[in-house]
Image (cartoon, rainbow, N blue to C red):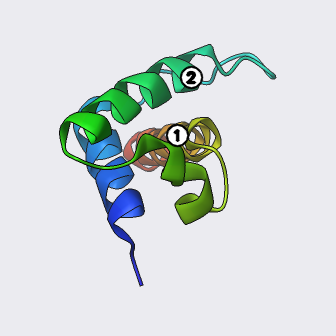
Protein backbone atom coordinates (compact mmCIF):
# COMPACT_ATOMS: atom_id res chain seq x y z
CA UNK A 1 0.00 0.00 0.00
CA UNK A 2 1.39 3.37 -0.98
CA UNK A 3 1.37 6.00 1.74
CA UNK A 4 0.86 9.68 1.05
CA UNK A 5 4.54 10.44 1.65
CA UNK A 6 5.76 7.87 -0.88
CA UNK A 7 3.09 9.06 -3.31
CA UNK A 8 4.18 12.67 -2.86
CA UNK A 9 7.89 11.82 -3.24
CA UNK A 10 7.18 9.67 -6.31
CA UNK A 11 5.20 12.52 -7.88
CA UNK A 12 8.06 14.91 -7.23
CA UNK A 13 10.55 12.45 -8.71
CA UNK A 14 8.42 11.88 -11.81
CA UNK A 15 8.12 15.63 -12.45
CA UNK A 16 11.64 16.74 -11.55
CA UNK A 17 14.24 14.03 -12.09
CA UNK A 18 15.54 12.88 -15.45
CA UNK A 19 18.37 10.58 -16.48
CA UNK A 20 21.44 12.74 -16.23
CA UNK A 21 24.24 10.27 -15.64
CA UNK A 22 25.43 8.60 -12.49
CA UNK A 23 26.90 10.77 -9.74
CA UNK A 24 30.35 9.83 -8.43
CA UNK A 25 30.20 7.16 -5.73
CA UNK A 26 29.37 8.71 -2.39
CA UNK A 27 28.20 12.00 -3.93
CA UNK A 28 24.60 12.52 -2.91
CA UNK A 29 24.57 16.27 -3.55
CA UNK A 30 21.97 16.06 -6.33
CA UNK A 31 19.75 13.79 -4.23
CA UNK A 32 20.17 16.11 -1.23
CA UNK A 33 19.21 19.14 -3.31
CA UNK A 34 16.11 17.36 -4.62
CA UNK A 35 15.23 16.11 -1.12
CA UNK A 36 15.28 19.69 0.18
CA UNK A 37 13.09 20.91 -2.67
CA UNK A 38 10.70 17.98 -2.26
CA UNK A 39 10.45 18.60 1.50
CA UNK A 40 9.72 22.28 0.88
CA UNK A 41 6.95 21.38 -1.56
CA UNK A 42 5.59 18.81 0.92
CA UNK A 43 5.40 21.45 3.64
CA UNK A 44 3.57 23.77 1.24
CA UNK A 45 1.14 20.92 0.53
CA UNK A 46 0.47 20.45 4.25
CA UNK A 47 2.63 17.37 4.89
CA UNK A 48 4.97 17.09 7.85
CA UNK A 49 8.40 16.85 6.19
CA UNK A 50 9.93 15.25 9.28
CA UNK A 51 7.73 12.16 8.74
CA UNK A 52 9.31 11.20 5.40
CA UNK A 53 12.03 9.06 7.01
CA UNK A 54 9.53 7.10 9.08
CA UNK A 55 7.01 6.70 6.26
CA UNK A 56 9.60 5.74 3.61
CA UNK A 57 11.75 3.59 5.93
CA UNK A 58 14.76 5.64 4.78
CA UNK A 59 15.71 9.27 4.48
CA UNK A 60 14.18 11.30 1.69
CA UNK A 61 17.71 11.77 0.31
CA UNK A 62 18.21 7.98 0.16
CA UNK A 63 14.80 7.52 -1.46
CA UNK A 64 15.60 10.08 -4.15
CA UNK A 65 19.15 8.73 -4.63
CA UNK A 66 17.65 5.28 -5.26
CA UNK A 67 15.23 6.79 -7.75
CA UNK A 68 18.06 8.59 -9.56
CA UNK A 69 19.86 5.26 -9.87
CA UNK A 70 16.74 3.52 -11.22
CA UNK A 71 16.07 6.32 -13.71
CA UNK A 72 19.65 6.21 -14.97
CA UNK A 73 19.56 2.40 -15.18
CA UNK A 74 16.36 2.55 -17.21
CA UNK A 75 17.91 5.08 -19.59
CA UNK A 76 21.02 2.92 -20.08
CA UNK A 77 18.77 -0.05 -20.84
CA UNK A 78 16.66 2.02 -23.22
CA UNK A 79 19.75 3.22 -25.06
CA UNK A 80 21.12 -0.32 -25.20
CA UNK A 81 17.87 -1.64 -26.70
CA UNK A 82 17.87 1.22 -29.18
CA UNK A 83 21.41 0.37 -30.34
CA UNK A 84 20.54 -3.25 -31.07
Question: x%, y% of residue 13?
Answer: 35, 41
**Farthest-out residue, bottom:** 1
Q: In which quarter of the image is the N terminus?
A: bottom left
Q: Disc 1 or 2, which lies upstream in sequence?
A: 2
Q: Residue at x 51, y 53 (%)?
A: 51
User: Label 2 near label 1: C-beta < 8 Å?
Assistant: no
Q: Residue at image x 37%, y 44%?
A: 82
**Foreground pick, 78 / 63:** 63
> The residue tagged with tag 1: helix, strand or loop?
helix
Towards the viewer: 79 or 3:
3
Is residue 18 visible in the rendered image? The answer is no
CA–CA distance between discs 1 and 2? 8 Å
* Residue 79 placement, left or right of 15: right
Q: Name the residue under label 2.
A: 32
- Other residues around mark 1 within 10 Å, as few (<14) / some (14–19) / many (≥20): many
Image-based side of 27 in relation to 63, left or right: right
Instruction: State whether residue 80 is above or below residue 19.
Output: below
Horizontal and vertical percent for residue 57? 65, 62
Residue 21 image offset from top left, x and y in percent: 54, 22
Q: Is mark 2 on a helix, strand or loop?
A: helix
Is residue 81 rendered to the left or right of residue 23? left
> Which one is nearer the viewer's eye here, 60 or 22?
60
Q: Residue 64 carries which label?
A: 1
Q: Is residue 37 visible?
A: yes
Identify the residue at image location x=29%, y=37%.
Answer: 43
Percent of width and height locating residue 37: 36, 24
Q: Residues within 10 Å of mark 2 (few under 14, many from 20)?
A: some
Amino acid sequence: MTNEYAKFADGYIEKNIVADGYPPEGDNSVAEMHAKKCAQKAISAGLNATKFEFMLSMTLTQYIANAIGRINDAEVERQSDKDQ
